[in-house]
Amino acid sequence: MKAEGHPEYREVVFHDLSCDFKFVTRSTIGTREKIEFNGKEYPLVKIEVSAESHPFYTGKHKIVDTAGRVEKFRQKFGTVGSKTAVAAG
């Protein structure tokens, strides 16, 4: 079997940007960024949602809207049939 046939499996830091939570796990994901975490340098992967910020695990419902899609939808269709309250902005 060829040695270069498998990706490198190594420890990586995943950084949840929505709540500034970082954790180390093993992965083959490719990344260009690095970070020093607990005195050691790791490859860095930035993510928007993890178990620390996901509503299913936290019990808090929040709408993550980075491009105004929710507001655009509500302007077009209103709140007809909506099960969530319109967030006061």
Image (tube, rainbow, N blue to C red):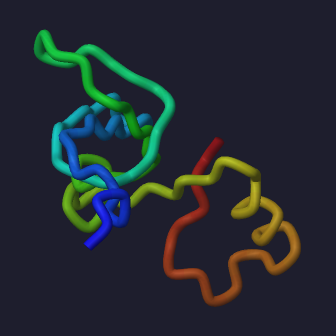
Q: Position of residue 13 (x, y in %)?
A: 27, 35
User: Measuring 76% from the left and 53% from the top, which residue is drawn there?
Assistant: 68
Q: Position of residue 15 (x, y in %)?
A: 34, 35
Would you say 32 lies left or right of 60 here? right
Q: Which residue reaches farthest bottom?
A: 81
Q: Which residue reaches farthest left?
A: 38
Looking at the picture, does residue 32 appear above or below residue 69?
above
User: Measuring 81% from the left and 80% from the top, which residue is drawn there?
Assistant: 77
User: Measuring 19% from the left and 40% from the top, which residue is drawn there?
Assistant: 11
Q: Quadrant of residue 45?
A: top left
Looking at the picture, does residue 33 appear above or below residue 54?
above
Q: Quadrant of residue 46?
A: top left
Residue closest to the eye, 55 or 22:
22
Looking at the picture, does residue 42 appear above or below residue 58?
above
Q: Which residue reaches farthest right?
A: 76
Q: Which residue reaches farthest front?
A: 1
Q: Tell me the quarter of the image containing the N terminus.
A: bottom left
Residue closest to the eye, 30 or 75:
30
Q: Position of residue 81 (x, y in %)?
A: 62, 89
Would you say 28 lies left or right of 59 here? right
User: Measuring 63% from the left and 53% from the top, which residue is drawn there?
Assistant: 65
Looking at the picture, does residue 62 appear above or below residue 33?
below
Q: Tell me the quarter of the image containing the C terminus.
A: top right
Residue closest to the eye, 27 or 72:
27
Q: Position of residue 9 (x, y in %)?
A: 23, 51
Would you say 12 lies left or right of 30 here? left
